[in-house]
Amino acid sequence: MNGKRTGSPRMAFHVSLIGRKDLSGEIYRQNRRAILDGRLRPGDRLSPSRELARALSVSRMTVTVAYERLAGEGFVISRLGAGTFVSPGVASPGRETASRRGQGALRPQAIWESIPLSSAFKNPARFDFRTGLPDASLFPHRTWRRLVTRALRSASTATGVYQHPAGDRDLRAAIARHIGICRSVTVTADDIIITNGTQQALDVVARALLAPGDRIAVEDPGYPPPRHLFRALGLRVVGVPVDYDGLVVDALPSACRAVYVTPSINIRLASP
């Protein structure tokens, strides 16, 4: 066995000696790197030397030498009869370490890194005029908790298995009935997919209907996040002007595979 997860129940750490020659030095370096990166935190327990040696198919002395080296540099402490633990005085990972971890193989596309995060809502405001947010004081929390508890007790959730990838069928059926009455749209539960929000819904639709390089028209000005999503999928985003009635249809460019618009309520003020 060439690998072993070691550490406390709240933080596991994998030691690998595949293709390594300096076995004791490699155990030392991997543990030291994990401590400096914050994967092993102060107070976390390392695997007993005998157990780790057995798992890695090395002598116990090989592990002991690595642990003693860590202890000599102040990274770990040994407690008689208890084991070896990460030292309480080990500093938390700094900005340099965090930055270095973020430069791995998995990185978000550049377009997402270019979007600044808003800090406008860090401080509480007396009046909140943000759109799309319900009044929490009017939400029936007691009824909601009762219904959630009832749902969690049902046989379907007690099995612990995955539900349908399109979402709970009863919920999809309720939505189909709702939009059938409110919007006169004839659909069934099989025509509906539950997503985590607008962005995921647009992602699913764009992946299913469009291909990289296709042109999609959007309102200009318009809501920015969908634009970023379409560009991230390799679509060519074309802005189209808007007026009091919404997107100017006559200004739509040719050869567009799709048009994304947002519903709105326009109020025209009469001239005095």
Image: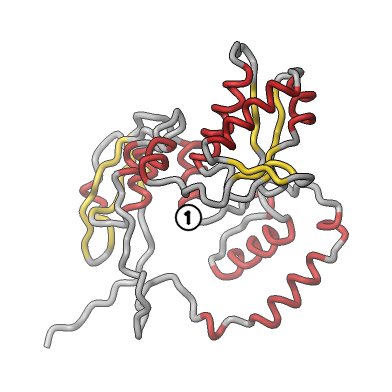
Q: Is residue 31 left or right of residue 48?
A: left
- The residue at 37%/73% (across/down) is 130
- The residue at 39%/29% (across/down) is 212
The quadrant holding residue 148 is bottom right
Q: Nearer the viewer, residue 144 or 242?
A: 144
The image position of residue 20, as x and y in percent, is 60, 13
Q: How is the image coloured?
A: secondary structure
- The residue at 75%/45% (across/down) is 80
Q: Nearer the viewer, residue 65 or 6?
A: 65
Q: Residues within 10 Å of mark 1 (few under 14, many from 20)?
A: few
Q: In which quadrant is the C terminus drawn?
A: bottom left
- Figure check: 153 above or below 22: below
The image position of residue 223, as x and y in percent, is 32, 57
* Outermost residue to the left: 272
- Total marks placed: 1
Q: Nearer the viewer, residue 46 or 187?
A: 46
Q: Is residue 113 left or right of residue 57?
A: left
The image position of residue 88, as x and y in percent, is 56, 52
- The residue at 32%/61% (across/down) is 118
Q: Is residue 217 left or right of residue 132?
A: left
Name the residue beneath numbered marker 1: 198
Q: Is residue 36 left or right of residue 24?
A: left
Label 1 amino acid? Answer: Thr
Q: Identify the element where label 1 is drawn.
A: helix
The image position of residue 181, as x and y in percent, is 60, 69
* Outermost residue to the bottom: 272
